[in-house]
Amino acid sequence: MTARLFVDAAEVALAQGASAELPEAAAHHALRVLRLRAGDAVTLFDGTGGEWRATIAAAGRRGATVAIGAHDPVERESPLAVTLAVSTLATDAMDYAVRKAVELGAASILPVVAARSQGGSRGDRRVEHWRKIAVAACEQCGRNRVPPVESPQLLGAWLATRDAGKPGVVLAPGGVATLAAVGVADAIDVLVGPEGGFDEAEIAAATKAGLRAVSMGPRVLKAETACVAALAALQALRGDLH
């Protein structure tokens, strides 16, 4: 598989027939991590849609230059736009949740801070880290549009402002509904709690805000596992995992 590299459209204008210097982060990944050399083929994408065939024209200690070829308008976005609102988790668990959410086609990722959240006070300093994980996941899985990772919000603030008419679920071990029973057109919010779960008041606030409490089966899943299970199930039911 040809190596895929993300280049920010604000830094590099991709156009067929042009040559461009790779941004520092992309050059480091290509030359130091992937060990690519001059003459190697790469695929470039900038998040605006589609991807470009390219070749590394020159590589050196100070960076790399690419010759940009044809544009392919291919898209790999799911027809189901899932917003994953997930409680801030411990570092490794949150990194895993963000990475897998991107691979499973989440349209956007919103960290929320609940009563039992971990790392909430450090959330703003972790946002750029999560966004880099989202970019790397797109490079790996073939997505050409990087889903936004929003700045953390207090759970109550998000619930107060979300569109109550939009389909949405909150994952709750005591929920009586299932994902298969939830009516979904083309968009849904999925709220996942912290390691210790949401408290009763938070579940009540979520359901009052229009979210339906659903169970993920007879076993209690870890928060990061619940993110993956819910996204995979929704993509199988309404998205592009058929």
Image: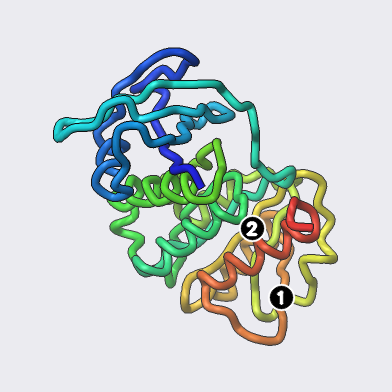
Using residue 186 as the reference point, say whether residue 30 is left or right of it.
Answer: left
Q: Which mark is residue 44?
A: none
Vertical order, 124 against 37 (above or below): below
Question: Residue 238: image x %, image y %?
Answer: 79, 54
Residue type pointed to by label 2: Val
Q: Residue at x 47, y 57 (%)?
A: 99
In terms of depth relative to the viewer, which is nearer, 85 or 16?
16
Task: Work out whether residue 124 or residue 4 is closer to the camera in this orientation and state it.
Answer: 4
Left/right placement of residue 170 relative to residue 68 reads: right
Give the residue furthest to the top: 17
The answer to whether 2 appears left or right of 172 in the picture is left
Quarter-of-image position of residue 235: bottom right
For image coordinates 62% across by 45% down, the residue present is: 162
Looking at the image, residue 26 lies above or below residue 11 = below
Residue for badge 2: 190
Hey, which residue is sitting farthest left in the picture?
61
Label 2 neighbour load within 10 Å: few <14, some 14-19, many 20+: many
For the residues marked 1 and 2, what is the alpha-carbon distance in whole angstroms? 12 Å
Name the quadrant containing residue 143.
top right
As displayed, is residue 81 above or below residue 12?
Answer: below
Q: Earlier in the sequence, mark 1 or mark 2?
A: 2
Q: What crowding class fits label 1: few (fewer than 14 Cα within 10 Å), some (14-19), or many (20 or more)?
A: many
Q: Nearest the camera: 132 or 185?
A: 132
Which residue is painted at 71% across and 55% down in the image?
A: 168
Image coords of residue 64 (percent x, y): 26, 29
- Asked if 80 appears above or below 214 in the picture, the reply is above
User: Which corner quadrant holds the C terminus?
Assistant: bottom right
Mark 2 falls on what kind of element? strand
Residue type beneath disc 1: Ser
- Disc 1 is placed on an element classified as loop
Q: Which residue is mark 1?
A: 215
